[in-house]
Amino acid sequence: MGLGRLSDLVACFILEEEIGFKLFDRLPRGVKISAAGKSFLADARRILHEVNEAAARAKRVASGQSGTLRVGFVESVSWHGVVPDSFREFRERQPDAELQLKPSSSQEQTEAVHSGRLDAGFVFTIALIGRELAQLPVASLNLMLAVPKGHPLTKLKKVRLCDLSDADFVWFPRRESPAYYDRLMHECFRGGLKSPHVVQEAVNEATILSLVSCPLGVALNLA
């Protein structure tokens, strides 16, 4: 018997004394692992594997490869472009990380990042957020006019804002994005649409488009 084998047996015998029961059956010629020993060995291997897995997970978290990332987004900019592309790329690069997504308005996201309920957010804003939060422009969006099928405006080759003076509008409440709301109203006024006739308010893009298709009115929509 080699020295390594002998030292292993000595260690096992010492372990037997510590746990209080036999791990090996003594035979006339050598030893044989007992039923209790087999059970103990299986559990020990499982525990060792779990410890190694826990260490690996902790290492991934420490290096930023795992953990949880909480991100907010405005639904109207999540259908295509930089927002869904970013989520897809993050999932490909960080398969072990948990991505928690929270659809909410720009103002709600800003408040959530301030309070620590979100780690980041894709917001649509014209005003500066403030020095206490880091911000990075990732995309610019255009506005399009959404109208029901068969609406008289669809017969015009070019639609100007002043052509919308008599149109019924589906609009979003100012509280959803005050800076964007005020800027949009200002641009409408400059273009000849001095006071849009708002017949219905809705808080998200899907609802606004659904109301347009009813048809309840027209809407200025993010492209």
Image (spheres, grey):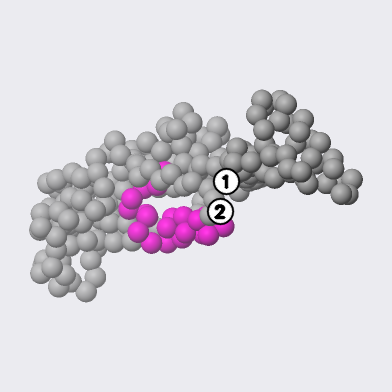
Counting from the top left corner in percent of width and height, residue 22 is at: 67, 33
Residue under the point 20% across and 56% down? 209
Q: Which residue is mark 1?
A: 66
Q: Is 12 on the left-hand or right-hand side of 49?
A: right
Residue under the point 44% across and 41% down? 127
Q: Which residue is mark 2?
A: 94
Residue under the point 37% across and 36% down? 108
Counting from the top left corner in percent of width and height, residue 89 is at: 51, 59
Foreground pick, 81 / 223:
81
Counting from the top left corner in percent of width and height, residue 128 is at: 48, 40
Q: Is residue 61 visible?
A: no
Q: Are marks 2 and 1 in contact (CB under 8 Å)?
A: yes
Q: Which residue range is magenta in the image?
A: 72-93
Foreground pick, 139 / 187:
139
Counting from the top left corner in percent of width and height, residue 178 is at: 33, 38
Check disc 2 and report its element: helix, strand or loop: loop
